Amino acid sequence: MATTALDQRAHAASHAEPTGLWSWITTVDHKRIGILYGSTAFLFFLMGGIEALMLRIQLGTPNNTFLAPETYNQLFTMHGTTMIFLAIMPISAAFFNFMIPLQIGARDVAFPRLNAFSYWVFLAGGLFLNSSFLFGAAPDQGWFGYANLTSRQYSPGLNVDFWMLGLQILGVASLAAAVNFFVTIVNLRAPGMKLMRMPMFTWMSFITQVLLLLAFPVITVALILLMFDRFFGTHFFVPSGGGDPLLWQHMFWIFGHPEVYILILPAFGVVSEILPVFSRKPLFGYAAMVFSGVFIAFLGFGVWAHHMFATGMGPLPDTFFSLATMLIAIPTGVKIFNWLGTAWGGSLQFKTPMYFALAFIAMFIIGGLSGVMHASPPADLQQTDTYFVVAHFHYVMFGGSIFGLTAGAYYWWPKMFGRLLDEGLGKVHFWLMLIGFNLTFFPMHILGLNGMPRRVYTYPEVLGFETLNRIETVGSFILAFSFLIFLINIIKTWRGPRNAPADPWNGATLEWAIPSPPQEWNFAQIPAVHGRDTLWEEKRARGGKLPEPPRVSGQGIHLPNPSYWPLVSALGLLGLMVGVILEPHIGPWGIITGGVILLFGVFNWAFEPAG
Amino acid sequence: MHLRIRALRLLRRVAFALPLLVLVASACNPDHYPQTALRPLSDYARIGDDIQTTTFKWALAVFVLVEGALIYAIFRFKGKPDDPEPRQVHGNTTIEIIWTVVPALILAAIAVPTVRGIFETNSTPTGDVLRVEVVGHQWWWEFRYPELNLTTANEVHIPVGQTVSFHMSTADVVHSFWPPRFAGKRDVFPNRETRMWFKAEQAGEYPGQCAEFCGIEHGRMAFRVRAQTPEEFQAWVSHMQTLGPKPQASAAPADSMRTASAGAKLQASQQPAKPGAKPTAPDSAAVQQPADPAYAAGEKLFMTKGCVGCHSLQAVNAPKGMIGPNLANVGARSYIGAGSFQNTDENLSRWIQNPQAMKKGVLMPNLGVTPDEAKSLVAYLRAHK
């Protein structure tokens, strides 16, 4: 095993936990990188939320002039882009980072410095995208960037350039992280951790990495073609030169639909961890849960054109993509029923994570059912591009992903920080979020079916949309307020003492076998795994609770050295992209400087002693 | 007695919330929404609506059952921390097969009408079909009737009871044509023709709008569908066919807007003694008040202020590729600014003076028209109906 090889090479130095800013800048510890991912993504999540509130204020009354049309278009584009690429994906990545090595019994990820690089590139991409606000040129073409609106002719400004290059940066981060976690899960599992013994969160994360590896190259290529169109005058998507705007839609959704599962599968995993623990009963139908996840991911690549029924593809493609889409409802249904089966007959413990996990199921059902409604093209032609679709995907992305990830935050907080979040505030957060969420998004179903299109900055009074829009705006503020409670909870907990035992919830998985928060090397001894729910097995074998694991000195445990070269390389990549934006003003020098820094960083990284 | 007082108090409290409840209840009624997709008025829209209703019923049943089971489980299996460990169940093959197969059957029940509906909506209509060409523009709609040699903008007139076949494209970026009472959306592309058809069942004026994000003014790219009885429609067509160039004028140079207005000018000079006279010749431009001085001034302004560079005034033989909407019957339309503002003199005047203030980003620039000039232009345009 790799671990024994590592142990043989181990040197005798003792590791004191490093502190200070420099230790965070040079860290290659998956847990610290996880915390960096989580906190950065949470800040972006708050920004995306403020953008959403501004959109809601604008739509609260007809013919409102709170936002100018171009500002509205920038805000809805940035809201979507931010929530997808800078909030949900990296919050999931925070849990991948922190939890996958712990759940499989590893000391770190397979490529710790690549992991740091992923984080720095993600941060660079997020800052790059949002810096567009400073130039008054935030992307304004929608997160889907449909051609030929994105061509130089119809979008002459920097807006599309920021979006196109920003996504390209973020794609580098996602792909590097996906390779890393894929290899980690395949190679670094503890002895006895067979694939079919892996915790469900690790399983769903594993499938997510495969989706990332297969879907992101497609958007990368599409963005490169767009870049050629905009910078070098090619005509891949420009009809006047023989290009085809429809080609962009196909390429975008071949990436875009798997992306939906990239956003939801980690939350599926989180909920599949929480339900058994708080039902005190193993996950119902483990194998079915694994294979339904695999099946969803597989089918996820064969349904992209259901986003394009209105383009008039003809009866045969419509039929194929309609039936394939309906097929996805079957494994998704299996998952929901298995979650119900897990709770059924259990002894449900109503802690905050359980509240969020149960609400996740309740909300996701609604999103799933409206999804089946637009699988049928003749009906979808009315629903698509209306608020009905906005309602649908918020029930899936917010009611699903965000509820699931919030459940995960409450569940794993004690493990990550050694402190239990306050239960009382947690439940206030929960109820406000549930009520605010439904007030905001449920009326959108009604508005959409009654003719309110998406992405309009205002609507005339005569169309009758005012009442429900006003209710939604009130709901959105309740929703925002619930996250204020969450922030207060975080601050309160932060100031409180370290009160979390190693295993506060009677967990079933390996992360609960080690101290909270874990020590830098995770496991003083690599554990041996003898079955699923391995910690429950061990507790049963020993007849009850395990003793609190001691904090030990890491004498003789090999750990990778800290490194700043990943950060330097990421800065080089950022500089290169900034150089492209500034090229009209400063010539090629920005691009050259960024490129040289990138090469310098990668070179030094490659020849740096690993430890 | 006490009970009555308590009931009254309760009523007073409820009464406080009553208007809100009424408001919400009415907001859930499709009749409250003129642009609703839930009150179909054509054969084509009914195909989708029927499938949607079927799917919705199944979805509602599943929703009630599954959410019901979830809520039941939450209350029924609530445990205490010191309760004994529940029975450790890992799965149940029979149940798992059932809840895989039953959803598959429900989906099959939805799939059958879906596939039938896909082929029906994609069929090509035959028989007595009226062809209408739709061209999307940033941010307005052009409608052409090639068989009738007519062009109009932002308000499409269609006959009730006759199938209309829409052949669609765009002059610039991708848009989506959506008249919800009659049909779902169909995107329009710059390099391919897309199609849609329907047979309207009821006369009336109905709103529709662009449903694919198309730039800054996507939110104000609406249109009106004017479904008319066959007689009314025929009358409209006959009238529109008078809104063309005069034969004398058509010999003039190629600029067709000029020919339209030249025709009007000719008529104005021919009939100075009969103010308000109706045009008699079927091929003359429709000019209602040729001797009105404001009209004459407006006509001159239309030529000199640059309006003529982007707007055509003739419905017959209208030029293609104009940047602005055709104005041949602008005086008779209910809305201006692509279905955005009611076509009152006041709105029209505001628009002419400062379109950017009403619809920021619209391709019509502010042309420095004074209020007095706007008055004349309104009089001129109002006469074009």
Image (cartoon, coloured by chain):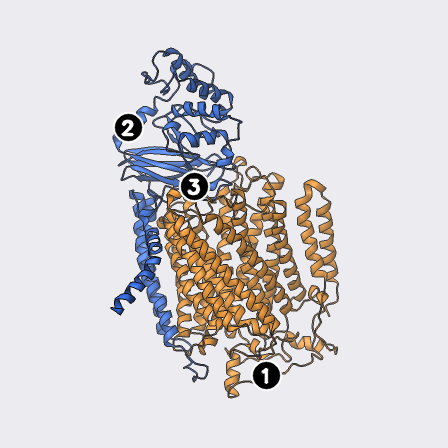
Above or below, A297 against B175 in this view is: below
Mark 3: which amino acid?
Cys
User: Subunit of mark 3?
Assistant: B
Asked if both marks, 3 and 1, belong to the same chain, the answer given is no
Q: Secondary structure at mark 3?
A: loop
Residue B257 sits in quarter = top left
- Among the chains pictured, the one given orange colouring is A
User: Subunit of mark 2?
Assistant: B
Above or below, A428 against A548 in this view is: above
Res. A580 in view:
yes
Alpha carbon of mark 1 to alpha carbon of mark 2: how far? 89 Å
Above or below, A314 against B376 in this view is: below
What number is the disc on residue B234? 2
Other-residue count near label 3 (Cα within 10 Å), few / some / many at <14 / 14–19 / ≥20: many
Give the residue number, with chain letter if any, for mark 3.
B210
Q: Earlier in the sequence, mark 2 or mark 3?
A: 3
Please give left or right for residue A548 compared with residue B341 in the image: right
Please give left or right for residue A441 compared with residue B5 in the image: right
The quadrant of the picture occupied by the N terminus of chain A is bottom right
Q: Secondary structure at mark 2?
A: helix
Q: In the depicted view, which residue is nearer to us: B233 or A429?
A: A429
Q: In the depicted view, which residue is nearer to us: B60 or B360?
A: B360
Tell me, yes or no, whether the two marked residues, 2 and 3, touch with CB atoms within 8 Å.
Answer: no
Above or below, A98 against B38 in this view is: below
Please give left or right for residue A440 compared with residue A188 in the image: left
- Among the chains pictured, the one given blue colouring is B
User: Subunit of mark 1?
Assistant: A
Give the residue number, with chain letter if any, for mark 1.
A548
Tell me, yes or no, whether the two marked residues, 1 and 2, touch with CB atoms within 8 Å.
Answer: no
Please provide percent x and percent y for residue B268.
39, 14
